[in-house]
Amino acid sequence: MKKIKVTELEPGYKLGKDVVSPDGLVLYPKDNIVTEKIIEYLDKWHVESVYVKDEEAEVVQTRRDTEKLVKEKYNKSVEKVSKMIEGLESGETIYEQEVKETAKELMDFTEDYYYFFKLLTQLEDDDNRLFQHSINVGIYSSLLARWLDFDDSVVQEIGLTGLLHDMGRTMTKSNDQATSQSKENEELDKEHPRKGFEIIKSQTKFNDNVAKGVLQHHERMNGEGYPDGVKGSSIHFFARIIAVADVFDQMTSVKFEREKKGVFKAIEHLNKESFNRLDPLVSRTFMNRLMDFFIGSKVLLNDESIAEVIMVNRDEPGRPLIKVRDEFVDLKKNREITIEKVLDV
C-alpha cells in the first residue's frame, strides 16, 4: 500500500483504505476502483492524498482495458445460459460441468464489479431478458456472498444457485413470454421454484444448499412468500441471498410486463422490504456496497433537473446527498425529490 496525492491519481488504481472526510464520513470506501469521476469527486472534497494498493503498472493498465473484456465475457455467458435454458425447454438434461464452469466464470465479475455495474446501466431489454436475468442474479448473488465474507467455494456455489434459480420457469406455462397477468398464470408462476427444485433433485448431483436456494428464493422472512410460506430461520441462507438479487434485478429491468424502475427506487424498495420480508443483513450489505458505486454519478430527478450523487446515507442508501447546480440537497430530509434515472456513471 502506498500514499499518493490526488493530483497524481489516475484511473485504474484500487483504493487501499477508506477515504474519510475530516468529520469522519466515508467519502469512498477501500477496494473500489478509481475513475476520472472519483478523482473529480475527491478533488471537490479537497482530499489531498489517498492510499492505493501497491500493484504492478501492468495490473493497473489491464484494469483500464477490462471494460471491453467484461462486456465480451458477459455476452458469452448469456449465450451459454440461453442454450442451457432452451435445451431444458426441449427436454434435454442439465450438463452439470458446464453449469459449474459458468458459475466459476461469474465469480470473475466479482473482481471487476465496477465494470459489471457500468455494463448493466447500458444494457437494453430484449429477447435475451430471461437469460440476462439468470446471469445477473448469479453475479449479484456471487457478489453478495463475497461481501458477506464467504470463502470462494461457497461464493461459487451461491452464484451457481442464482444462475439456476429460475430454471423452473421452463416447466411452467407462465414463463417470460407470457402476455397475460391472469390469476391462473400467477398461480402457475408460483410453481416455478418447486419445479426448479425437482429438476435439480432428479437431474443433477448438486447438493441440498443449491436445491433449497432454488426452492425458497421467493419465500419471505415474515412467511408471506411461496411456495411453502416458510419464514425466518427456516429459509435457507442461500435463498435469502438469491431473493435480494432477484428482487433488485427484476425491479431494474423489464420483466413480466412490469414497469422498469430506476436503481435508486429499487434500493428504496429493498430498504423497506428489509424490515420484514427480506433478510436485513443481506439487504443492507447489498444496498450499501452497491450505492458506493454510484457516488459521483449524474442522475435525473423527478423535476427533470440533473444532479450529482455526493454521498450515501447509510441508514437510507436509496436517498443520498445530492448536488443540484450549486445547492446540496439531502434526499433523506427532502422527501419530495426522487431520483428517476442514472444518466452517467
Image (cartoon, rainbow, N blue to C red):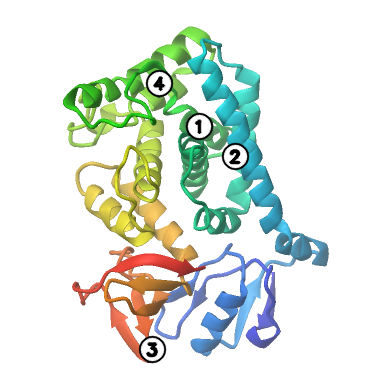
Query: Which amino acid type is shown beneath numbered disc 3?
Result: Arg
From this view, report whether residue 276 is shown above or below residue 79: below
Considering only order in the chain, which callout, 3 or 1, is on the residue closer to the N terminus?
1
Considering only order in the chain, which callout, 4 or 3, is on the residue closer to the N terminus?
4
Q: Is residue 206 visible?
A: no
Rendered residue at 34%/43% (across/down): 247
Q: Which residue is disc 1 drawn over?
A: 163
Q: Which mark is residue 168?
A: 4
Considering only order in the chain, which callout, 4 or 1, is on the residue closer to the N terminus?
1
Query: Which amino acid type is shown beneath numbered disc 1?
Result: Leu
Evaluate if marks 1 and 2 touch, with contact meaning CB atoms under 8 Å apart. Answer: yes
Which is in the foreground here, disc 1 or disc 3? 3
Query: Which amino acid type is shown beneath numbered disc 4?
Result: Gly
Residue 167, percent across and down?
Answer: 44, 23
Q: Which mark is residue 106?
A: 2
Quarter where residue 39 is shown: bottom right
Which is in the foreground here, disc 1 or disc 4? 4
Tag 3's secondary structure?
Answer: loop
